[in-house]
Amino acid sequence: MKAWDRGGNLVDNDTFTAGQDHTFNLGTSDGSGEITEGFKVSLILAAGACRTPPIIGIA
């Protein structure tokens, strides 16, 4: 997961690894706090050799 501030600066870059079922609080895994509303976020989901293209949204 990557997050950029409104100025386009990368502010968070995390990798999460899980088994079959897991829930993550995407804003706090590295202790940086919640992702600020309005920041752009990008997720790539992967399982084995399968990966999605980046999924981009706004927090």
Image: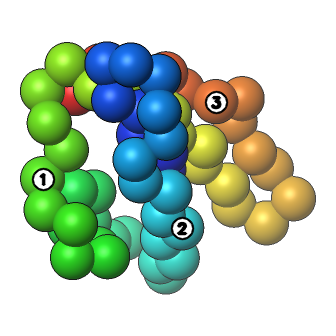
Q: Which residue in the protein does label 3 denote? A: 54
Q: Is residue 6 left or right of residue 11?
A: left
The secondary structure type at the circle numbered 3 is loop
User: How many marks do you count on the picture?
Assistant: 3
Q: Provide residue 38's location: percent of width, then percent of height.
A: 19, 19
Q: Provide residue 47's location: percent of width, then percent of height.
A: 69, 61
Q: Which residue in the protein does label 2 denote? A: 15
Indicate the amino acid at tag 3.
Pro
The secondary structure type at the circle numbered 1 is loop
Q: Is residue 25 above or below residue 2?
A: below
Q: Provide residue 50's location: percent of width, then percent of height.
A: 80, 50
Where, quadrant-wise, is the C terminus in this rendering?
top left
Indicate the amino acid at tag 1.
Glu
Q: Residues within 10 Å of mark 3 (few under 14, many from 20)?
A: few
Residue at left offset 32%, top offset 76%: 30
> How far apart in space, not on screen, are marks 3 and 1 (Cα)?
21 Å
> How far apart in space, not on screen, are marks 1 and 2 (Cα)?
16 Å
Instruction: Determine contact: label 1, label 2, CB under 8 Å.
Output: no
Q: Provide residue 13's location: percent of width, then percent of height.
A: 50, 57
Indicate the amino acid at tag 2.
Thr
Residue at left offset 41%, top offset 53%: 12
Q: Earlier in the sequence, mark 2 or mark 3?
A: 2
Whether residue 25 is visible to the viewer of this picture, yes or no, is no
Of badges 1 and 2, the one in the foreground is: 1
Q: Which residue in the protein does label 1 denote? A: 34
Name the mark on residue 47: none
> How far apart in space, not on screen, are marks 2 and 3 (Cα)?
14 Å
